[in-house]
Amino acid sequence: MLPFYFLLWCSYPPPLSPFPSLPRLAAGPSPWTCSLLTPPGLGDMSDPFHSAYLRGNLGAFAADMRRMIDAPELSDVKFIVGEERKVVYAHRCILAYRCEAFSTMFAKQHLSCDAKEDEIPFDLSDVQPDVFLAVVEFLYTNCVMLSSKIALDVLTSAVEYGLDELQRLCVDYINSTLTVESACEALQAAVTYRQTDMKDKCLAFIEGHTKSIVKTRGFHELSDPALLTILQSDLLTIDEADLINFVREWAHVNSVVLDKPVPEIGKEVVHELRLFLLTPEELTILEAANKKDNFIAMDKIAEVWKFHALKKSSGIAVHLLRRRKGTRPRDHHKYLNLYHK
């Protein structure tokens, strides 16, 4: 069972020596230990006048830096964060040198304000205080405390601030803590922010828990591209008739939320519904339901009836004839060219 909170650390590469001719340190078996390297031609390291670049305990350094987070003493910039209007104190030099977005933010303020106005706090009303403090913690210490409550929002902030390493930590955490309730929301974030590894992990989880996930709020809130990612999979563990019903529910929910007709909401995703897997009896039921909302275009249903009449699959997109992992066998499937094995 994974703990609710994870403390995630970035790797600390050996620091570069300010003197190129001097030896540098190589990371040892522990992130807190190191050893001296002797570059070729530098001679005997036992020479008492030989110089070396050493580093101390990085854990202690991070702990000391953490004490500076949101500390009013010696701070020189304030942020008003979230709807709660929480004041967060910080240090310009740390934020600016660690994050280009903050550097630009401070530079613009300096150019547009006089000395007194330079002390005006920055208003960040669109981010939660816990999320912003997690970003600040990363900038100060190169580590971050994440929970399932804030991980996706921290990922969003990491993308906005261009913090690639923080993005990686968030993705690692999210991938390792997926649940039935969180999988679709995580997939949505992965699709939005083009996180390929995270998208693959979320899809694999959804494939293994499809019957439960299609009942979640997160499934109903998926965008078209995210839902299409799911519907294009051959490994969904649900029967096609049931999947069609849940996608219809998705369309009705989004029709209300977006104030658009059901056919308009579903015009893209219906192309990935494998109607040819349904029996004539199931198709009759589907057609009756479809008369109420026109979720599926009539020409698509007519194409399936034609397939059943002729028992020929020529001209039909190959993937629409494949059984998914959870598809129940039907007698007419013997006429399909390909199916999941």
Image: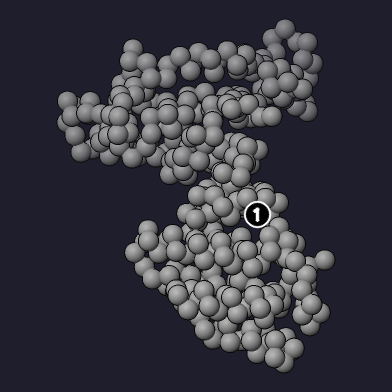
Residue 295 in sight = yes
Question: Which residue is drawn at the image coordinates 55% and 79% (left, top)?
Answer: 287
Q: Picture quarter containing residue 93?
A: top left
Q: Picture quarter containing residue 36?
A: top right
Question: Which residue is drawn at the image coordinates 64% and 68% (left, top)?
Answer: 241
In the depicted structure, whether residue 191 falls above or below residue 122: below
Question: Which residue is drawn at the image coordinates 48% and 34% (left, top)?
Answer: 150
Q: Position of residue 206 (x, y in %)?
A: 65, 52
> Which quadrant holds the C terminus?
bottom right
In the depicted structure, whether residue 264 falls above or below residue 308: above
Q: Position of residue 238 (x, y in %)?
A: 68, 60
Work out whether residue 339 or residue 55 is closer to the camera in this orientation and state it: 339
Work out whether residue 77 or residue 263 is closer to the camera in this orientation and state it: 263
Q: Picture quarter containing residue 254?
A: bottom left
Look at mark 1 in the image and give the residue it sits on. 210
Question: Which residue is drawn at the image coordinates 54% and 86% (left, top)?
Answer: 299
